[in-house]
Amino acid sequence: MKRLRLSITGFGTVGQGLAELLSTKHALLQQEYNLDIILVSVANARSGFIYRENGLDIPAILELAAARRSLTAHPGVTHWENPLEGLRTTGGDILVEATPTNLHDAEPGISHIRIAISKGMHVVTANKGPGALAADELFALARQHGVQLRMESTVMAGTPVISTIREGMAGASVHALRGILNGTTNYILTAMAAGQSYGEALADAQARGYAETDPTADVEGFDAVAKTLILAALIFGRSLKPGDVIRQGVTTITREQVQQAIEQDNRIKLVASLRLLAGDARQEAALEARVAPVALPLSDPLARVDGVMNALTVSADTLSEVTIIGPGAGRAATGQGLLADIIACARGQV
Ligand code: HSE
């Protein structure tokens, strides 16, 4: 049995969702994957960093988090106010980074990731900031230290898009990606198509836990931009900046526009796209990146993806078009992406 010492930084919906899965799937992970995963440390903004060498009691820690009590109430833990110091001192086999996405400077997640990699830990992140703003630097650091950095759950949560393209479609030349990558805006546009107002639909999406801490990131398209930057780095090997992505959100879309599109057999969707433009022999092809509402004809597979569902259409030389549809947000769905990455780290896939 392979023993893995796991640390989780960020213990909100995503971190707790993973902890739940680690608990409910503990026997399956042992039986099917020969893995004994021990959660040795957890950090959140309220409590700082707690550590227990023999593993934390997951149901107990979930109860503390649900009751909004300090995690330091868990028996027998060592505590650091600063997660960086805790992580630097205690280490582990894998860091799961699940602090909220910050698209300005990627903190505090990027510092957690740098420390963990430098200590020889694999890193699995659901936090989009580090991958969107500093993929080049972090992957170089991971290579230097011989560890894996995986981020399946940053794009379409646990629906496997990154691994499907990189591993399942290995050898194919991808020339374009088009996707519905933000569940909140897709939920809003779907609800508006059914007659709801923008405000009602947004409140509903927030209540269901789909929206970012600040929903501006969703409705103005920044969340989809972050995912587009991650795909540009991981699928096309291009390091784009947020300003390189042409961006328009959904805040100016009216119920009338949505209804009018329906009358014309179209559906308005917030589409994120990456497309290699024709280059010439001397120059690398440019990569066009865009996030904007588009009226899609019903013949387009993305047009029929409704509610919180996400989808990505991959255009590649050998497969023409492949569309992957699945949940793009939510506690268990994001936890699933993290769990798959953890198992991949344990198997030694890069
Ligand atoms: N706020 C995001 C969404 C969550 O609505 O898709 C998942 O990244």
Image (tube, rainbow, N blue to C red):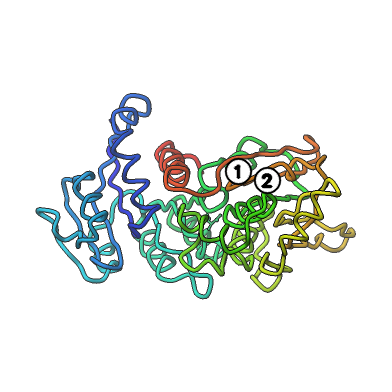
* Residue found 36% across the figure and 55% down from its top: 120
* Residue found 29% across the figure and 33% down from its top: 26
Q: Quadrant of ligand 1?
A: bottom right
* Mark 2 touches mark 1? (CB < 8 Å): yes
Figure check: 248 above or below 39: below
The quadrant of the rendering that contains the N terminus is top left
Q: Quadrant of residue 228?
A: bottom right
**Which residue corresponds to mark 1?**
161
* Residue found 74% across the figure and 68% down from its top: 246
Q: Amino acid at mark 1?
A: Val
* Residue found 45% across the figure and 54% down from its top: 125
Q: Position of residue 289 (x, y in %)?
A: 74, 62
Label at residue 312: 2
On screen, residue 336 versus residue 256, left or right, reads left
Figure check: 134 above or below 273: below
Badge 1 marks a residue whose secondary structure is loop
Residue 44 versus residue 238: which sits nearer the camera?
Answer: 44
Q: Residue furthest left?
A: 76
Badge 2 marks a residue whose secondary structure is strand
Q: Residue furthest right?
A: 280
Quote the CA–CA distance across marks 2 and 1. 8 Å
On screen, residue 38 versus residue 124, left or right, reads left
Ligand 1 within 8 Å of disc 1? The answer is no
Q: Position of residue 261 (x, y in %)?
A: 81, 53
On screen, residue 59 versus residue 188, left or right, reads left
Q: Amino acid at mark 2?
A: Leu
Q: Position of residue 248 (x, y in %)?
A: 71, 68
Q: Which dot, 2 or 1, sits closer to the camera?
A: 2
Q: Position of residue 310 (x, y in %)?
A: 62, 46
